[in-house]
Image: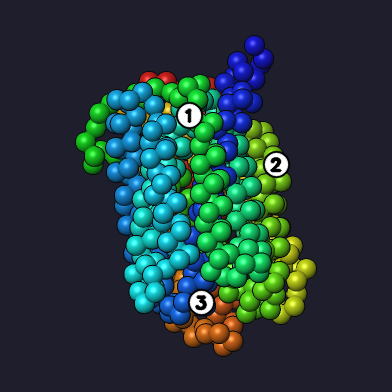
Amino acid sequence: MSKGRQQGIPSYRTLLFYAPLGMPLAFGALPVYLLIPHLYAQNFGISLSLLGIILLAVRLLDAIQDPLIGLWSDRWAEQHHGRRVLILLGIPGMILGFYGLFNPWPGSVWLSLACSLIIFYLFFSVTSVNYQALGAELSRDYNGRTWLTTSREAGALIGVLLAAALPDVLMQQWGRVQGLELFAGIFALFLILAVFPLLKSSMQRPVFGEKLPWWAFFSALKHKPLRHLLIIYLLSQSANTVAGTLFFFFVDEILGAHSLAPLFLLAYFLSGALGMPLWLWLSGRFSKSLAWRLSMLVAIVAFAGAYFIRSGEVWPYALICVLTGLTLGADQALPPSLLADHSDRDTRSRPGNYFGLFNWVGKAATALGAGLILPLLQGLGYSAGQNLWALSFCYALVPALIKILAVVLMGVWSLEGRNSLVPLMGGYHE
């Protein structure tokens, strides 16, 4: 047996079977928070304030349901000796909700949007919570966890690369309506194909843990380092969501380069994929929290630079996309790896609990980021072609300020779930 395997690093076979589902999950999630705000504001005439209210309400509802889904999933998986059925359960609903988002009901666009989002988020949560929890169960090694989350997020980055490029290509070729219908069909195909490797018996793990009442789900928050981790994750994801929500507005109005938007997204996500080995190395050489903090410093510099971008400055903005994209790998791979370490230290809980809680915080962050920034943007006087300073402020400086707060807090807080590479046994230790 190799030294890596002795230390608990997952085999390449395990990584290759585990990673694929990350691709369609990201392929579906990206348009929901990146394309939907601009699409419904520009093409379906929903005001920014109403759009913000819908996104905030539905995403907060989605955030509330995640802990309950995590708790129920753990109990079901323990009784049935694995999570494969739960991972499969969410797929039909995701396909239905995703199709509805791009084909709203005539005459009731806002209601169609709300219903489609609720359906998509519900079933996305069932699959994604159990998929993430399975990753925590496949390895209990400090660095092995990072390999699993990195492989999952590498698959996710492939998904977002495709999701960033395909909508414009399909709409140019087939028109908006047929192009988006085809986009939804491609998502369904990817989702069905990617789930098959997880159905193999070698990818199943028994689930054990103490049966707890539903309100005990939040008991993990009594551990200070975990609270710190979730607060930093909330801030980081809120900043990212603000920039993502306003991306198309910024490219259209400030840069005046709508046709280049897919290329900017490709540069962003490709940089994230290429940067993952760097964060993996840094987290192993130093610590996961330090690597994550360094990535935020890079993001702050890049966001601050975006405030000074003016019309036609394509290459400077491309550089900003590369720099912010570089930090994406750390944002996606390191927080869930840190969380899995925390779940190991709590012998009264199970990974589904922790990842349900983690997704709850992440979705609350997207709700706040998207739901509050659009009304703020409208409140500052922005409209198409007017008060563009407000758009630059909200797109660039608001995320930078949020990231600065996160970096400051990381300087005084401990986020690590382990004090060394040796697993801690027997309970959660502060």
| Residue 369 percent location from the top left of the image | 46, 64
Which image quadrant is residue 169 in? bottom right
Name the mark on residue 278.
2
Q: Residue furthest left?
A: 213
Residue under numbered circle 1: 199
Q: Quadrant of the N terminus?
A: top right
What's the amino acid at mark 2?
Answer: Leu
Q: Which of 356 and 43 is in front in this view?
A: 43
Neighbour tally class for label 2: few under 14, some 14-19, many 20 plus, Cα within 10 Å: some
* Residue at x-position 55% and y-position 42%: 22
Q: Which residue lies furthest to the bottom in this view?
A: 386
What's the amino acid at mark 1?
Answer: Leu
- Sequence-wise, the earlier of marks 1 and 2 is 1
In the drawing, does residue 266 fall left or right of residue 409?
Answer: right
| Residue 161 percent location from the top left of the image | 64, 53
* Spatial separation of the CA atoms under disc 1 and disc 3: 40 Å
Residue 64 visible? The answer is yes
Q: Which of 235 and 276 is in front in this view?
A: 276
Please tell me whether mark 1 or mark 2 is closer to you in this view: 1
Q: Which of 193 and 290 is in front in this view?
A: 193
Residue under numbered circle 3: 43
What's the amino acid at mark 3?
Answer: Asn
Neighbour tally class for label 1: few under 14, some 14-19, many 20 plus, Cα within 10 Å: some
| Residue 145 percent location from the top left of the image | 54, 31
* Spatial separation of the CA atoms under disc 3 and disc 2: 40 Å
* Residue at x-position 52% and y-position 56%: 184
Neighbour tally class for label 3: few under 14, some 14-19, many 20 plus, Cα within 10 Å: few
Residue 125 visible? The answer is no
In the drawing, does residue 349 fall left or right of residue 37?
Answer: left
Residue 421 vertical placement versus 331 (above, below): above
